[in-house]
Image (tube, rainbow, N blue to C red):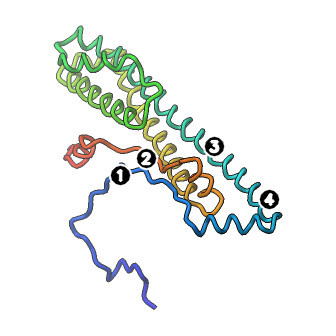
Amino acid sequence: MANELDEMTGPVNSDGRDVNVIEKQIKPQLTTGTKIFEIVLWIFIIPGLIFAYLKVKAKQYLQQLQQRIQANASTIDNYLEQRVVILTNVVGLVEKATKLDKETYENIAALRSGAKQLSDDERNITASNVDSAFRSINVAVERYPELKSMAVIADAMQQNSYLQKEITAARELYNDSVARWNAAIFEWPTKLIVAARAGYTTRIPFTASAEVKQRARESFF
């Protein structure tokens, strides 16, 4: 019997394919069959009691998973806030040394309030704005070699690079938790029943902005 997916003879898209995250939240639904299944269990009482216990455990699991997602999101927010603080300090130094783009200065000023208690969309927008501000500062530093010799700026740039790596790692943990959640709420029967009655929906993982995707396609060297 041949393989269903044969990488040697199967159809190949030589042009490749761009992948996008779908901005859609799906809600688990209770079917008639699931409702009948639950009623039948209660007819025999003991199976119904056991199933009720399993639903309690399922609810606890989903609640714990929600807390994990929130903790992962908070970690991202903390790193974003640290990047904002660092760039705020750097932009002041660069502004004194050279004529920095006014828009860059205003963008950093707008971010000074910090990245706290953000929604998923706001978190992505803030991350994109911080990346954009850093690129503008980096361009200014590249234009003025004397700025590179300033220990404070060099240290700040190094810290920024470190934080960006930590944000990437934190996003992977966040997306992993989101993937667990999206799979769990459709696990039949206990988790799906609990999720449907609680009104839970799937969550949307971290998505890169269109600007970041475009830059990833560009030639850097």
The part of the image, by quadrant, that contains residue 120 is top left
Crowding at mark 4 (Cα within 10 Å: few <14, some 14-19, many 20+) = few
- Earlier in the chain: of badge 1 and badge 2, it is 1
Q: What is the crowding at mark 3: few (fewer than 14 residues within 10 Å), some, or many (at least 20)?
A: few
Mark closer to the observer (4, 3): 4
Asked whether 165 or 57 is in front, the reply is 57
**What is the spatial separation of the Cα atoms under label 4 and label 3, in whole angstroms?**
21 Å
Which amino acid does the dot numbered 4 rest on?
A: Leu
92 left or right of 119 in image: left
* Three-letter amino acid code of the residue under disc 3: Gln
**Residue 3, x across and y down, in percent:** 43, 84
Location of residue 48 in the rendering, given as x and y in whole percent from the top left corner: 77, 62
Pick whichever of labels 1 and 4 is earlier in the sequence.
Answer: 1
Residue matched to label 2:
205
Q: In the picture provided, is 178 more to the left or to the right than 197? A: left
Q: Mark 2 or mark 4: which comes first in sequence?
A: 4
The reply to whether discs 4 and 3 touch (Cβ–Cβ < 8 Å) is no
Residue pointed to by mark 3: 63
Dot 1: element: loop
Q: Nearer the viewer, residue 8 or 52?
A: 52
Query: Which callout, 4 or 3, points at the residue further toward the start of the chain?
Result: 4
- Badge 4 element: helix
Which of the marked residues, 3 or 1, is nearer the chain's N terminus?
A: 1
Task: Give percent across and percent down for residue 32.
Answer: 57, 67
Residue at the spot of label 4: 49
Whole-angstrom CA distance, mark 1 to mark 4, is 40 Å
Eyeballing the image, is 140 above or below 183? above
Which disc is residue 21 wearing? 1
**Mark 3: which secondary structure?**
helix
Distance in Å between CA atoms under marks 3 and 1: 25 Å
